[in-house]
Image (cartoon, rainbow, N blue to C red):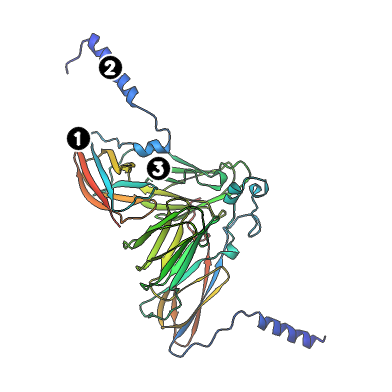
Amino acid sequence: MTMRTAVLALAVLIAGCGGPEYPQPKPDRAQLIVKLAARAKEGVKGPRGDTGDPYSSSGMSPERSKNYQRVDYDDLADIAVILKGSSLGDGGPAPTAARLTIGPDGPDHRLVLLGPKKHTQLTLRNELKRSMTLGCMGQSGDGFVATVAPGKEGVVTLSDPGVYELNCDEDECLLVTIVVAPTTWAALGKSGDEIFFDGVAPGELDVVIQAPRLPDIVRRVSATAGARATVDAEISVNQMERTK
Amino acid sequence: MTRLPRHIAWPAAAALVAAAAFAWKPLANAAERRERPAPMLVADTGSVTGKATFSAARPKQPIIVWLEREGGEVKGTIPEPLHIGQKGAQFNPSFEVVVVGQKVIFNNDEDKEIDHNVYTLGAEKTDLNIFSKGVSVTHEFKNIGEVSLYCSVHKLMDGKLFVAPSTAYAYLADDGSFSIPGVSPGNYTLKTYQKAKRFRDVEVKITVNAGEATKVAVELKR
């Protein structure tokens, strides 16, 4: 292989690794890409995803070793990205339905995102062998309580935008954040994802990023007609005020 | 001032001391504290008693009634520091009420070399950093409201605190009744806090007079 061929091959390789390709923005609309990245606390030892703790490999009971599961920041899921702005209309990708399954290992999501429309539905599935009574109440007074029989499903609705904390009578530790977005411009992603919003009305926007158990991030961005803006969102406790 | 004859004064004093000793009981555990919060040390106080009713089934998790004083809190007793252990990658206790200014001591009491982090979200957002086995970190919460406790290392290690402005709070008993003794006279707003929120929180304006029990009916509705 000549040097010239090698350089060409390298250029092709680099071009191929450039991430997803997005369509060009419409002249009167803006595009927005939100790059999600979650970071572990500075000073935490051990490789990512590795339990690292001596308990995890010491033959202890599964219940106890379960407590030592580490947060895998490189694979952090259920991150909600919500656009807020006065110029935003409908037409965003917010989900109109969501599903939460409660199984032997707990809920399959720590955060659920719903769009703001009244017909958005949350299906609660109970895969345990006992009934589960689940409920929540938001700041506005909207909420629900549902008892779901073993192996069955229940469908509930939430209309008022806001953040709700789903709780459970039978399991005090079962907590799931439900976010009802104020606009349809909202999407879910995970660490490493690029969340792409197309056809956004131009104007000043707040990009709100909410991840389970982590502080919210708000980024102000100007959405310009015919242009694409990129927002980097690093989700971590590292920016929090430290007491010690 | 008239002095009592010695043959009356000494037995009377002894009886008083005995009665006080009989009545006094150290607050041994969280459950006991829930029934009897420490009163504020104010000479002439009143109390707030009442009962909560529910429009639907009540969740099993704690519900608190607490008082917010108009014009600022009266400086009262700050309870002893609350110790929260972390053994087994669990906050222990996983829920407690603390008072503004009360120290909370997080103890890494693991048996093995396991690091924990404590950070908080909600009414107060702070990061207490990483600490190793045998190390304790102390923090005083200043903001009133719910504080969620997390460890950034362990994904199931969650807890909660409710930060009250003073010791003028009570846990609802099983029948919904509550009693807040030792309340300094003044105007207050009685508020509710639900660990597992199922009802709209309630606010009731009340006045507490010295030597009187102010009765309050609390209706928790959806």
- Identity of the amino acid at label 2? Ala
* Residue where numbered disc 3 is placed: B102
Q: Quadrant of the N terminus of chain B?
A: top left
Relative placement, left or right, of A72 versus A116 is right
Label whose residue precedes the other's in the sequence (1 or 3): 3
Secondary structure of residue under mark 1: loop
Query: Which residue is the extreme one toward the top?
Result: B7
Secondary structure of residue under mark 3: loop
- Identity of the residue drawn at 19% across and 35% down: B211
- Identity of the amino acid at label 1? Gly
- Identity of the amino acid at label 3? Gln
Q: Position of residue B13 (x, y in %)?
A: 27, 17
- Residue B211's label in the rendered image is 1
Label whose residue precedes the other's in the sequence (2 or 1): 2
What's the distance in space between the residues labelled 2 and 1, CA to CA? 24 Å
Q: Position of residue A42 (x, y in %)?
A: 58, 58
Task: Tell me the chain of label 2.
Answer: B
Have a look at marks 2 and 1 and say if they share a chain: yes
In this view of the protein, can residue A208 be seen by the observer?
no
State which mark lies toward you, 2 or 1. Answer: 1
Relative placement, left or right, of A49 versus A108 is right
What's the distance in space between the residues labelled 1 and 3, CA to CA? 27 Å
* Residue where numbered disc 2 is placed: B13
Task: Tell me the chain of label 1.
Answer: B
